[in-house]
Image (spheres, grey):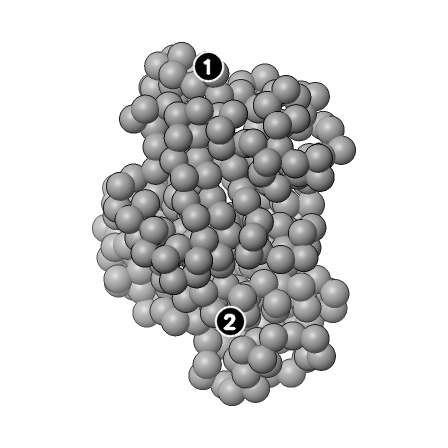
Amino acid sequence: MEGLPFCAILCRALPGVCLRNKDLLSISDLSSKDITTLIADAMDMKAQRRNKCLDGRALALLFEKPSLRTRVSFDMAMHQLGGHTIYLSPGEVGLGKREAVPDVARMLSRYVDIVAVRTFSHQTLEALARHATVPVINALSDLEHPCQALSDLLTIYERKGRLKEVTLAYVGDGNNVAQSLVLAAALAGMDFRIASPRNYGIQERILRLSRDYARDSGSEILCTEEPRQAVAGADVVYTDVWVSMGQEAEAECKQKAFAGYQVTEELLSLAREDAILMHPLPAHRGQEVTDVVLDSPQSIVFDQAENRMHLQKALLVKMLNGLSPC
Ligand code: CP
Ligand code: NVA
């Protein structure tokens, strides 16, 4: 445990001290201390690799949408920790169709120790968490993608050695990924700028909450319609798809609205010379980002994806209170 912040050591030493809430549906379920602890634990997990402290525990992955990274990283996280995963594919359970959401929550709670859920509607996720007696993790909803944002903070911390006084410029849709990122950045003391077209920004409620967090952590939040203003001098340039899963009907309209928001070599050149390019993947190459930028040495998108597994290992252990020494 050498080298870990005191709060991380304390959380390990005292069984029963875990995250602030039973569930992780939103970044707002976490405190800034929770975030620091998760990053420290994830770095430790990444260095140790084998750590069977979740032996005998089971995770259900209940997904209404497709996934590569989230599914595989959770499955491998659980496997490396000695636990077991059950994957329930889109359509298999028929959430709210074949079976009422509260009944699915009650049933799964009888079989497994924790559930990670990917839903279209955030309300479905909240209903599941309300009725489940085991912890529920948001594995992406229309509102947030907290596991992505937490892993991204880990990746930025690894690259920059700090989060405070780091400026992240997000260019594109104020979607689930952006909404978790702004909350996480504000809690962690990182400056956050977002450039999106009018009517495609972050929800007002999330922005207000982020500004409250930013007041406490000393970070700054800027919303603009001008990508160049957001990117100028930034340490991290971040983008995501313009058309998220479930928004296919809006594709044509969104592609027009986002026409000036592609991350090109020219836009990236306005950031700091040592700036990194991040994207949660999957990318729509040639839309929100060019091939050249995504494949450039500044792009760290695959490290980012790998870190999903390490961060989620830390998260699973914390949420399951798997504090026994390994
Ligand atoms: N970034 C991410 O969540 O990827 P998947 O949709 O493949 O899980
Ligand atoms: N905003 C994207 C993220 C995918 C990881 C989506 O919701 O489809």
Where is residue 123? Give x, y as percent.
Answer: 26, 48
Q: Is residue 156 visible?
A: yes
- Identified at 49% across, 29% down, the residue is 229
At label 1, the amino acid type is Ala
Where is residue 238? Give x, y as percent.
Answer: 55, 36
The crowding category of the residue bearing disc 2, from other C-alpha atoms within 10 Å (few below 14, some 14 to 19, many at least 20), is many
Q: CA distance from mark 2 to mark 1?
A: 42 Å
Residue 271, label in figure: none
On-image quarter of the C terminus: bottom right
Local SS, label 2: helix
- Identified at 56% across, 31% down, the residue is 232
Q: Nearer the viewer, mark 2 or mark 1?
A: 1
Local SS, label 1: helix
Which residue is identified by label 1?
259
**Along the viewing direction, whichever of 215 and 207 lies nearer the viewer:** 215
On-image quarter of the N terminus: bottom right
Q: Earlier in the sequence, mark 2 or mark 1?
A: 1
Whether residue 288 is situated above or below residue 205 in the rendered picture: above
Which residue is identified by label 2?
318
Whether residue 217 is situated above or below residue 277 in the rendered picture: below
Where is residue 148? Give x, y as percent.
Answer: 51, 48
**Along the viewing direction, whichever of 312 and 194 lies nearer the viewer:** 194
At label 2, the amino acid type is Lys
- Identified at 34% across, 38% down, the residue is 202
Location of residue 55 (image quadrant): bottom right
**Along the viewing direction, whichever of 285 and 224 lies nearer the viewer:** 224
- Identified at 25% across, 55% down, the residue is 127
Whether residue 219 is situated above or below residue 242 in the rendered picture: below
